[in-house]
Structures are given as structure tokens and as C-alpha cells.
Amino acid sequence: MFKKNRKKYYIVAFTLIFLIIFFYWQNHTLQITRYELTYENLPESFDGYRIVQISDMHGKKFGMENIGLAKKIKSLNPDILLITGDMMSSTINDEGAFFDFLDHFNRACPIYMCLGNHEQIASQLTYLADNDRYSNFLARIRKKGVVLLDNSRITVKNDSDSITLLGLTPELYHYSRRDIKHYDENLSLTVSYIETVLGESPEQFNILLAHNPAYFKEYVSWGADLILSGHVHGGVIRIPFFGGVFSPEKIFFPEYDAGLFESRDSIMVVNRGLGYSKVNLRLFNRPEISFIELKSN
């Protein structure tokens, strides 16, 4: 009897140890997802251009002072680092993790960033509270080398060629749920809105940083060649062959949860993010670094 019970205890103990290791691995180790994207309109000198994308840090650290994240990205030898928002949380002072990462990354390559909904909410909250948290955030990241694209564009040159990089900051109401019965279509982000804040799409190859991937069809219609998004955290819990379960708007099985999406000549990469959403859990959904290599056809 004692031997049988001891065997059961061993099985339970090993199962618990396995689950602890598995959940730690799922939540605290970085996964690099690699993409090779081919475009006919990519300038010749950008053939082989290496892009790293990160998103949705929310105070998450990998190694002391985020040195692990910085080293991992540096090892990829990127030409450019693109950040698609939510590097801070709206109601928690956790932006120090982002500052630490930038210190250790030490401008290893040019860094560009668009705003996420949490930065926008933090901006409104600090205005209402009459404090300078958000303005300090902007000042510090700019001092550490981040170029913020807040409904703006910039030309990125490589040798004699150039591409256009754009950052879209939609209104917070553009994050509202569109699956509810009485949804007001006036709350949707439209092509005309994008043209109002960003202008018409460039004739040359362009990359659009847009935190919310829900408007993929509108980004395509506007004329984006490559769209980089985040926001959905991979769906928090991913079910193999089915995808992510939740979106921040509490929509089950969101259409654009993570990975690669294509329409016409446009491609969207949705990064699963580094940190947590409202639930401090990731399952089959490791924190992600997107590594994109551009190829000319």
C-alpha cells in the first residue's frame, strides 16, 4: 500500500513540476517569429532589409532591467526597430521596463514607434489629474532615441533609395466593439479618416504602424504595403489550429489575432506582444519578437 501511494505522490509531484516549468516557459521566455516578405515595389537597396517589431510591453521584463530582451534583439542585427504601441500601461506606472530596455539597447539601430491605446488613455488621465507622467514618458523615450510617429510620416533612406514609414494614432472610440447589436458605424475607422490624419498613401513603398489590427481592410484600401500591429496579445490563450481566444475588447476568437495576413498586395504582421493584457496569463502564446526580412521580387 505504501509503495502504491508513493508512486502516486511521485506522479503528482512530477506533474506539478512539469506544469510550473511549462507555465514559466510560456510566460517568461521569448519567441522569435521570422518572416520573409517579397514585394515587387520594394526599392533595390532595401532587398534584405531587416526589421524587428515588438509591441505591448506593459511593464514586462526579460532579465534584470530588460537586458535579456535588448540582447535578443541586438543578436538579430536589425536595420530598424519598429514598436507598435502599449509600451506603458494606462493606470500602472510600469513604463520603467521600457526605459530600461532602451538603455540597454543603446540605439543599436534607428527606433520608431506608434502609440497604442494605453499611451492615449494615459495621456488623458494625466491631463485630468494635472500631472506630467505622460509628458515625462515622451521626453524620456525621445531622449533615448525613439522617434514617435503620432499621425505622422517620415522618409527612411538606405543608400540612394527610400521608403515611407507612417504611424497611425486612431481615436480611442475606434477601439470600440463592432460586434454588438447596436453598434454605431460612425465609430468605425474609415479610409477617409486615415487620409485626413496621414494624407494619401505614398507612391513609394510604405510601412504603416497601426496598433489596432481590426481595420486591416481599411489599411489595405488606403494603400499600405506592410502593416505592423499588436494590441490583441495573441488572444491571451491560443488554441492550436483555432487561434487566440480573447481580444482586449472581450471579443471571442478575434479575426486578426496574431501572425501574417494578406490582401491584394498588402501584408499585415500582428505581433503577439511581450506583456500581459488584463489577465496575467499566456498559454500556447509565448512573448514574441517579430523578425521581418524584406525581399524585392
Image (tube, grey):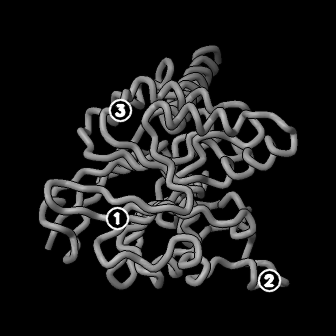
Residue in front for this viewpoint, 200 or 254: 200
Residue type of the residue flagged with mark 1: Thr
Q: Are marks 3 and 1 in contact (CB under 8 Å)?
A: no
Say which amino acid is labelled 3.
Arg
Which residue is painted at 19% across and 77% down in the image? 40
Q: CA distance from mark 2 to mark 1?
A: 33 Å
* Mark closer to the chain start, 3 or 2: 3
| Image side of residue 73 versus residue 126, left or right | left
**Considering only vertical position in the picture, is 277 above or below 140?**
below
For residue 107, what is the image quadrant? top left
Residue 274 position in % (x across, y down): 52, 42
* Residue at which label 2 appears: 184
Which residue is label 1 attached to?
Answer: 164
**Residue 171 seen in the current view:** yes
**Which of the marked residues, 2 or 1, is nearer the chain's N terminus?**
1
Residue bearing the label numbered 3: 107
Measuring from the top left, give residue 29's x and y in whole percent. 45, 33
Q: Position of residue 77 (x, y in %)?
A: 23, 38
Q: Is residue 130 above or below residue 118?
A: above
**Which residue is drawn at the image coordinates 35% and 68% (left, top)?**
206
